[in-house]
């Protein structure tokens, strides 16, 4: 009879999630690229969009850009981490780049 504190057998242990797993190094490189570069593009788009839109509601431009930078820094780290932990990195990376492009395009309208 087995004891209460037995180690799980290798056949019953769940597979650990890794950045470079069975899908190969290309997927891991995409996760890192999309997380770092896509997160930076998203943060830049947020700064551009908020820096151009907040003055329209009466906030001074300098304060609007400062607020946008602070909020973009808060959004950058979770974006990178979410991209590394994503279950569907190709889809999420493309959505990240599309959102960043949309924010930059929106900022150029104002």
Image (spheres, grey):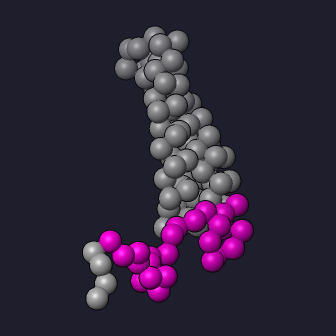
Q: Above or below — where is 2 with respect to 5?
A: below
Q: Is residue 26 magenta?
A: yes
Question: Magenta: predominant secondary structure element?
Answer: loop
- Residue at the (46%, 29%) spot, across then down: 71
Q: Is residue 19 magenta?
A: yes
- Quarter holding the N terminus? bottom left
Q: Give the camera-side residue of 45 and 87.
A: 87
Residue 42 drawn at (x, y percent): 56, 42
- Residue at the (65%, 54%) spot, across then down: 32
- Residue at the (41%, 78%) spot, across then down: 8
Q: Which residues are magenta?
A: 5-29
Q: Give the camera-side residue of 41 and 102.
A: 41
- Residue at the (62%, 59%) spot, across then down: 31
Q: Give the camera-side residue of 68 and 25.
A: 25
Residue 95 drawn at (x, y percent): 53, 58
Residue 108 drawn at (x, y percent): 59, 35
Please say whether residue 52 is visible from this viewpoint: no
């Amino acid at each position: 009879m087995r004891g209460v504190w037995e180690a799980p057998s290798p056949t019953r242990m769940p597979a650990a999630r890794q950045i470079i797993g069975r899908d190969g190094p290309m997927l891991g490189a995409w996760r890192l690229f999309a997380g770092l570069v896509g997160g930076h593009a998203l943060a830049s788009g947020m700064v551009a969009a908020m820096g151009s839109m907040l003055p329209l509601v009466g906030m001074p431009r300098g304060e609007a850009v400062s607020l946008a930078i602070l909020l973009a820094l808060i959004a950058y780290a979770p974006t990178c981490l979410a991209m590394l932990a994503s279950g569907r990195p190709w889809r999420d990376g493309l959505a990240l780049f599309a959102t960043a492009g949309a924010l930059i395009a929106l900022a150029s309208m104002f």
